[in-house]
Image (spheres, rainbow, N blue to C red):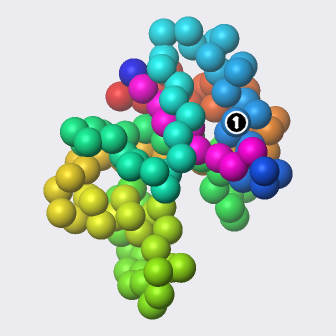
Amino acid sequence: MKIYVLGNPLVKEDSLPLLIVPKLKKAFPNIDFQTVDPNENFPPEGEKNLIILDTVLGIKKQVLLDLDDFDAIKKTPISPHDYDLLFHLLLLKKIKRLEKVLIIGVKSENDFPEVKKIIPILP
């Protein structure tokens, strides 16, 4: 299994997944945790099913989200600044380059125990 880890180490609120990855690698040595920059050729060519660990703003606790949970958001970009990761993933799904995307959303670096419970139930 491969889990893509997103986060910006320069922005405290966005670096949360990066802070728990060392513990996750130790707890799940058979999982390939890949830290990636979503702005650089993401997702890799040929990847149709993704699992992403990322900070999700506005959640009350750690949560597992399916990209389909965001289909209701019919956000059309007004400018290139509105083209974010969510819009990118939804567009790739619409053109059938992606099939399934699961997002493990975290809100704090203390989320490790809950994330550790979510990972074993992933497909």
Q: Quadrant of the C terminus?
A: top left
Q: Position of residue 51 (x, y in %)?
A: 43, 38
The magenta stretch is: 2-9
**Residue at image coords 65%, 47%:** 7
Inspect the image, locate mark 1, and give the three-letter code of the amino acid beneath it: Leu
Q: Quadrant of residue 111?
A: top right
Q: Which residue is mark 1?
A: 18
The answer to whether residue 13 is seen in the rendering is: no
Q: Is 97 on the left-hand or right-hand side of 11? A: left
SS for tag 1?
Answer: helix
Q: Is 65 on the left-hand or right-hand side of 56? A: left
Q: Quadrant of the N terminus?
A: top left
Q: Quadrant of residue 60?
A: bottom right
Q: Position of residue 92 (x, y in %)?
A: 27, 60
**Residue at image coords 66%, 11%:** 26
Q: Is 46 on the left-hand or right-hand side of 90? A: left
Magenta segment includes 85: no
**Residue at image coords 42%, 84%:** 77
Image: 33 above or below 79: above
- Residue occupying the far left of the picture: 96
Q: Position of residue 105 (x, y in %)?
A: 60, 47
